[in-house]
Image (cartoon, rainbow, N blue to C red):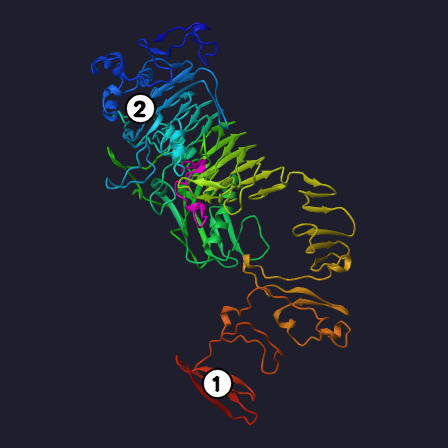
Amino acid sequence: MTINYLPETISEIGKDIRGIKHNINTTILDFSNGVPINDGTLHKLSDYYDALEDAESAFTGVPIAYAGVKLGGWENVSVAWCAAWMASISDVDNVYIPNGRYIFNAPLILRKEGQKWYSDGESRQIFKHHHVNTAFEFIGDASSFRTVLTRRNYRDSSDDSHDDPLVACIQIENNGIKFNVPVVIEHNVSWASTHPNNMIGGDPVWDVGVFVGCRVEVDLRECVVLGHHKFANVYIDVTRSALLSELKGWDNVYNPASVQSGADGLCMDYCSLSGGRWRYVILGAKFKSGYSSYGSDYLKYLTITFSGNPTQGDTLTLGEQVFVFGNTADFGEYTIAIGNTLTETLDNLMMVLYGASEVQDTSKPLFNSAAYLLDGNVITCVDNTESTSNFSNFTANKSSSVITLSGNTVTITTTDPAPYYDDVYGLVTDNRGGYGASDVTGYRMFTTESEYLTGRRVWEDIRTDKNHTLEGISAGAMWIDSPAANSYKRIWGQRYISCRFASYDPFIVRLGKCARITFIDCHTEPAERVIKKLDGTTTTDRYGSYTSTKESLAINIEGANASPSSAYFNIYGRGSNVFRPLSGINRLGGSLNIKGSITSGTGSIYEDPATLKLNGGQYQDIYFGDSSQAKKGRINYSGVVMGFRTGGSTGVNAYQTMRLEYLPAFNQSLWDTPYNLKVESSTGSTTIDSVTETNLVSDVSVKTKIGAATITEAQATYFRINQPIRPDTSNSTVATVGTSGSRFGKGWINDLRMIPPSSVTLTGNGELAFEAVSDTQVRLKLRGSDGITRSVTLTLA
């Protein structure tokens, strides 16, 4: 029934009528034509109506016939579902659900903009204790209601498949809808007890609890969703577009059109989610293979192709900003560290690019006008849609033999390389989910593990190679992964505060393509436990509290109870930060700009002038690892000497040795630049200034300089080498180890391998050589003291 101008208080429908004010149209969903629908019993239409026409007359506009086809006849349709659908298409703004349990056997689609659904009584689920006084309970196998709800997959023709169809208990298909009614599918405990290796096989079949079809300002505050939903308890879609036709519901009715193609303003405050493969997901579009953004982003572009790893001093100029590739420790803010591989170098470049883009320096309008996409070994500069500068004026330059530009200026084309195929309009500009999903809030959102009544099971095991970036659907508490048409080219601006994310599955919080996602004082669990999979086998493997990829930018986690694993959490670009105050482990991605000073104990770091102030005695220790370890460094300001302690002794004398080591991250040779070497032994020391490869091996009598008649093996100071020794590639064929007149005395080699030439001419008496005559013969040569060379040829089996 409908009540207009509802009084301020109506005692007969309860004291807690949330959000309902006078002068607002409200319908009260308690009885329908005298039929009780809130007693936890499935009331079928056949119990009260003799013919389909009678039922359709009582529930005008409700798709009873469509539902009946899928349920084996109109007679089987739930009366409670009919009443709810009728309320959803009425002209009322508010639907009030009194205390009780309403049994549905068909999905409910909400299409009225701004309609609000309120439930009576407490709606909260804490661990396995359900405080749910009111609920919509969905029963049965709903697979016959499945239809396409999303457009994640890219399609460039009618031959390309749609997304897999899904069925949702509640499907929200308009903006501004508020829904805080608990949604439940019950767990079949009796069935599970007799099927220990398939705990959920006897449960009702529903894919999603609450589905939000890419709509803005949806409010799920205080919503409880319980049940083993096959995909997610709550699924937020970000794949609609105003340029595409709307999808049809299972009732063959097109969903309402709206310009906004995103999920902005979603409210998930005080929600409780439990049981689904995923408890909460926000998922967006996938692009055409080989592209990292919408095809329209490639209508104005400039590409930068790398055929190999840059070398020291190579430069790349983007707009006003110059980036220098370097392999020394002399790094500036825009110096790109050269990695061991091109992939590592490009990762370093993108990290600096993202950081520089974030600054939005007003003196660099051309640089700021571009967004930067990495596709393999190609960086594509495209229009930063939020910049006030004209990207058409963007320029680029380079100084490198391995970098190729598509041009020094932007290429403009009218051919969209990646349009999207729509069944109604054909090929159109791809803008799926362009609005993104910003201003999403989750406050005290509560998710529990995948089981919510009995057992402790996981939906799916972790990959055997534990590569979290290649996981498919998998399972967990939260998953965010979606592009958007903004300067980040991904959804951004979401905040989760004081939430609990729990999962026995491979993931807890899984972050993909997203940016500026903030977690404040959120709790994640569990850690390592022995869990059963649905097939009955056990596992303990997890990816940890938070996972992210190179597509996850500016992820901020403050007050975490558990730090992410470094193997699965990527601190990449634009400053992703993890602050865990209780553990003392904090990670900072990007630069830290100090305005003032940082002070701790007796030491300080000052911004201007750039000063590291170490208060104390004549020296300060720098520990590598735990302070109880022997290996640590010392700076002695008396004489400005730095030393490294390598042994177990203590005292000042323990720091008089410096070890020089190869730095593989920057490909730095030991001889790149001269340095001063202090040589020490137990009997004395000396310093060789400006050491180079030449003067180190020249005839310098170290033993004379340190005042020792002889140096025993125990007294000598060694170069310790724990990296490969190799000649420079430019002269590898002429480089030698020792000479005929200056030879090493002894050599111990575990594994000696040679590639001998086919012919060798011996020039010195006593020389021995091998020749590789053929694939089956080796020749051994020796030049005797008489100057005659003799040989023997060995035949190989």
The N terminus - image quarter: top left
Q: Report crowding for label 1: few under 14, some 14 to 19, many 20 or more residues within 10 A (C-alpha).
A: some
Q: Identify the magenta region.
A: 457-486
Query: Do the CB atoms of the residues marked 1 and 2 lie less than 8 Å apart?
Result: no
Horizontal arrangement in the rendering, residue 575 relative to residue 488 (left or right):
right
- Camera-side residue: 234 or 333? 234
Earlier sequence position, callout 1 versus callout 2: 2
Nearer-the-camera pick, 230 or 164: 230
Q: What residue lies at 61% left-to-right and 61% top-to-bottom?
A: 661
Indicate the amino acid at tag 2: Ala
Does residue 365 appear in this view? no
Q: Is residue 184 visible?
A: yes
Q: Quadrant of residue 653?
A: bottom right
The disc at residue 296 is: none
181 versus 247 height, above or below? above
Disc 2 target residue? 106
Q: Which residue in the structure is indicated by mark 1?
A: 780
Please say whether residue 475 is one of the residues in the magenta stretch.
Answer: yes
Name the kind of residue labelled 1 in the image: Leu
Q: Position of residue 698 (x, y in %)?
A: 65, 75
Instruction: Please identify the quadrant where the C terminus is shown.
Output: bottom left
In the rendered structure, the answer to whether residue 703 lies left or right of residue 208 reads right
Q: Give the distance between the C-alpha atoms of the residues marked 1 and 2, in whole angstroms.
A: 88 Å
Q: Is residue 286 left or right of residue 608?
A: left
Q: Is residue 604 magenta?
A: no
- Disc 1 element: strand
Residue sitting at x 26%, y 21%: 76
Residue 359 image point, x, y percent: 53, 40
